[in-house]
Image (cartoon, helix red, strand yellow):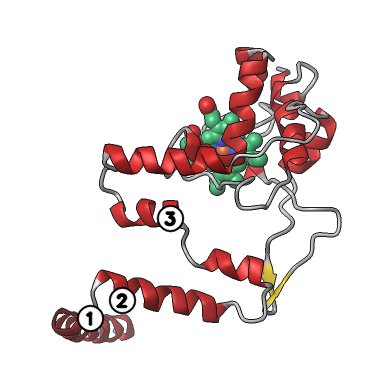
Amino acid sequence: MRKMIVLAGSTSLAAVLIAAGCASFPDEATTRQIAEKMMHDGFPGVPPAFAKRVAQDRSQQICSKTGNAKLTQQESADVVKLARASIRYPASGKLIGDWKVGAKLAYNGSGSRIRGGKLEKAKAGNGALCSNCHVLNPKEFNVGNLGPSLAGYGAQRGQSEAVARVTYERIYNTWAYVPCANMPRLGSSGHLAPEQIAHVVAYLLDPQSPVNKR
Ligand code: HEC
């Protein structure tokens, strides 16, 4: 009975909100401003470099604007171009690092968190947390599935320079390949350093890595 009252109450509230909304809903630019101000005010006291991230960059604006609608060819091309321009490589030029370091990064979710209004510092550097969205080691099952399984990644593709480059770039900023994909732009956002990404590349490619064992 109680549930029904709550339900009836919320239905009529929704009706009022809809009626009010139709009369006075602000235009797209104003809505964006209000949303960005809410985001900004929601994270007081964070360093300016991080505060900048609560405002959408150009590619995020393109990706949000279209929502579930298809991107136009021009929009896709713009997102790819911006992503490409953002990619940096390790100073050493080596795109394949140490797979054992990469293995730790792939399961480590620390860094880039706001706690108590402050940006939390990850003592040992930020983690990559690939396992939140991908199967990596085929023996594990308690991992996320938002992204495709990466089990056997190197065994299937080999370790050529071209494979290493594509893999590196997709981790750095996958929007250079799949505009607006649901994978975070881990390098472009500053979350992972180029050398860290090279270690993760090694974890995906090295024949000794658990990713490539059965
Ligand atoms: C929030 C979820 C999420 C996280 C975290 C994430 N990914 Fe992804 N990943 C995706 C999604 C979704 C796709 C599919 C879209 C695309 O191809 O970009 C993808 C695609 C990929 C691809 C291309 C796969 C193929 O078959 O070509 C690679 C490689 C990849 N991710 C590696 C990684 C690595 C390595 C990490 C950790 C450093 C990582 N991802 C973190 C969601 C994620």
Measuring 80% from the left and 60% from the top, which residue is drawn there? 122
- Tell me if 202 is positioned left or right of 64 in this view: right
Q: Tell me the crowding category of disc 3: few under 14, some 14 to 19, or many 20 or more residues within 10 angstroms, Cα based.
A: few
Per the image, the residue denoted by label 2 is 30
Element at label 2? helix
- For residue 58, which numbered disc appears in the image? 3
Question: Label 2 to label 3, Cα distance in Å?
Answer: 17 Å
Nearer the observer: mark 1 or 2; the answer is 2
Per the image, the residue denoted by label 1 is 14
Q: Which amino acid, by three-letter code, is at mark 3?
A: Arg
- Tell me if 197 is positioned left or right of 4 in this view: right
Measuring 57% from the left and 46% from the top, which residue is drawn there? 185
Element at label 1? helix
Would you say the beta carbon of the disc 3 residue lies within 8 angstroms of ligand 1? no
Q: Tell me the crowding category of disc 2: few under 14, some 14 to 19, or many 20 or more residues within 10 angstroms, Cα based.
A: few
Nearer the observer: mark 1 or 3; the answer is 3
Q: Which amino acid, by three-letter code, is at mark 2?
A: Thr
Q: Which amino acid, by three-letter code, is at mark 1?
A: Ala
